[in-house]
Amino acid sequence: MYAKKRNGAIDFWRFIFSLVIVSFHTFHYESINGIQPFIGGNSSVEFFFLVSGFLMAQSADRVTDAKDRLGAETARFMTRKIKGLYPEFAVAWVMAFIVMHLAKKTFSLTSIVKDFLTGLWELCLLRMSGLAGYRANVVTWYISAMILAMLVLYPLLIKYKDTFFVLAAPCISIFLLGYMYQVFGNLNGGTAWEGFYYRGLMRAFADLSLGCIAWKLCQAIKKYEYTRLARTIFSIIELGGYLFCLFLMSGRVSPDMSFVLLMVFFICVPITFSHAAVTAGLFDNRLCYFLGKASFSLYIGHIFWVKSLEALFPSFTLKQRLAVLFACLVLTVITIMKLSDYIRKTAPSAVSSVKKLMIRQ
């Protein structure tokens, strides 16, 4: 069911940081006596960007002699990437569209049609290009930013591999992060429009480039056989780093520490992928693989419930709404995973049938 090439530790931390984002959004809307655990939890997105950049560099490394077919190789990579996430994305978007309109309670057929048509930009992964109409599932900004940034970075990566790792990626990440530090003071506000770009798109370019560098560091780490002592040190750095990130996101420090958080993630991610830590093998099991797979469905399937429960259940107490939220999240994750698996299984035969119907053989 799960490929052996999966990294259980990455899957485990994917799930943990997805929970952090859910907690951040939940208590942003449903604060209990002013308590907001993980008030900086939106910075977990930096981890996901870094991992995506790492995997992009890993894919590019497998491509040889692509200078004369950049378009074809880029199209192949982007197609594979979109196929890997779009079934879950589409199912969650439809669920979000329905739930958000039910929460309105007063709507017409005209408004539904209008929201659907203007929301197609989001459904087509183009929201962070500036084509932003109705937003059914606001957390999908991350997916759109990642796809659009990859569309630019990947052909550069496969054409100028060494130059990209040594020169382009460091320059892109350093200068963009420096700009955001001076202008915004933090890495928050992915959906903030800054005149001719979304702030989240800038984050995507910076973090994905940093993820490419993390891949290069991982290759350097994997060159050597390490002693038990060295592997223990790697474990301490890795676990300590992730726990420190959780501490930072708990909100006990100033917002500009989000840049420090990103750098700590940058140190931890190549160690986790390298399997150099003595604890690495503990995560290579079916449970962690499942949690990693479920993390994406959890991420894209929570915010519309969080934003709608008070309108859907106005007479419920806060504790009752939180209980309902928990049940809704469990059912939503299961629904997204099951329906997306079904779509992947049936899509090839459906496409084949349409081709036979529309194209002469």
Image (cartoon, rainbow, N blue to C red):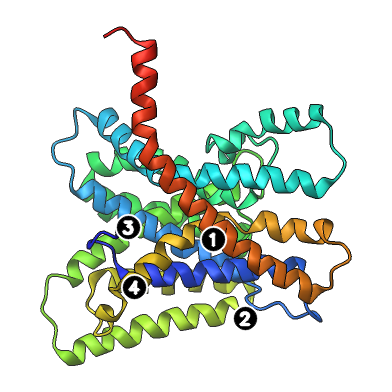
Please give the label number shown on residue 143: none
Q: Are marks 1 and 4 in contact (CB under 8 Å)?
A: no
Residue 47, percent across and down?
45, 65
Mark 1 or 3, closer to the camera? 1
Please give the label number shown on residue 253: 2
Q: What kind of residue is marked 3?
A: Phe
The residue located at (42%, 74%) in the rendering is 264
Q: What kind of residue is marked 1?
A: Leu
- Disc with the residue nearer the chain's start (3 vs 4): 4
Please give the label number shown on residue 54: 3
Residue situated in front as seen by the camera: 187 or 82: 82
Mark 3 or 2, closer to the camera? 3
Q: What kind of residue is marked 2?
A: Val
Mark 1 or 4, closer to the camera? 1
Name the secondary structure under disc 1: helix
Please give the label number shown on residue 298: 1
- Disc with the residue nearer the chain's start (4 vs 2): 4
Q: What kind of residue is marked 4?
A: Ala
Quadrant placement of the N terminus: bottom left
Circle 3 Cα neighbour tier, 10 Å, few/some/many (<14 / 14–19 / ≥20) = many
Name the secondary structure under disc 3: helix
Is residue 193 shown left or right of residue 55?
right
The residue to which callout 4 is attached is: 9
The residue located at (40%, 38%) in the rendering is 151
Circle 2 Cα neighbour tier, 10 Å, few/some/many (<14 / 14–19 / ≥20) = few
Is residue 98 shown left or right of residue 166?
right
- Disc with the residue nearer the chain's start (1 vs 3): 3
Toward which corner of the image does residue 4 lie, by quadrant?
bottom left
Residue 226, percent across and down?
14, 83
